[in-house]
Image (cartoon, rainbow, N blue to C red):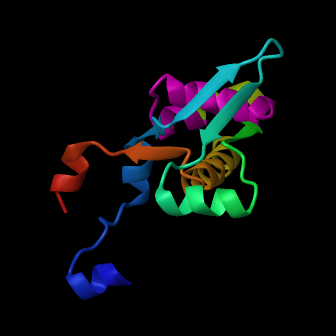
Amino acid sequence: MFEKLLGQRKPKLTKDDLLASRPVINQAITWTEKDDHVIHVEIRRRDVWWIKLLSKLIFTPDKRSIALDETGSFVWKMIDEHQTVRHMIGQLAKQYKLNRRESEAALIAYLRTLAKKNLVGFEVPTSRLSRK
């Protein structure tokens, strides 16, 4: 809303831009791989004054932990290897014997969920942004 008022807009990305992008893990997050090959992601509580005040009134833990399932862990490792979304779709289809369309839909939905939770962002090649 404020972007429209201030004249600032987020760049519009096409499907090709998304497929050429590389998901990157948020640097504020720590993660480990356990013995059972499951990824455990730890998200630390933000250290701002109003959250500290709120934590005095209502118990809020210092960190939150998420355990990814087998497929989520597979995708997370591909993200850590700095692969493009297009390459990840092919790897996911090969690993789980899916057709490309199924793999693409599932991966994009999963990456969107991770992005909404601020666990990952997307690195778009500058050549794709400069043509707009």
Nearer-the-camera pick, 86 or 74:
74
Q: Taking 56 as reference, is 28 above or below it? A: above
Nearer-the-camera pick, 94 or 118:
118
Q: Does the segment drawn in magenta span residue 76?
A: yes
The quadrant of the rendering that contains the C terminus is bottom left
Instruction: Determine the main secondary structure of the stretch shown in magenta.
Output: helix
Nearer-the-camera pick, 93 or 123:
123
Residue at coordinates 59% horizontally, 51% vertically from top-left?
A: 108
Name, please, the residue furthest toward the left.
130
Residue span colored magenta: 67-89
Name, please, the residue furthest toward the top.
35
Q: Taking 110 as reference, is 42 above or below it? A: above
Q: In x, y percent, where is residue 58?
A: 74, 62
The quadrant of the rendering that contains the N terminus is bottom left
Q: Does the segment drawn in magenta span residue 75?
A: yes
Is residue 119 something that shows in the picture? yes
Q: In x, y percent, where is residue 48?
A: 47, 55
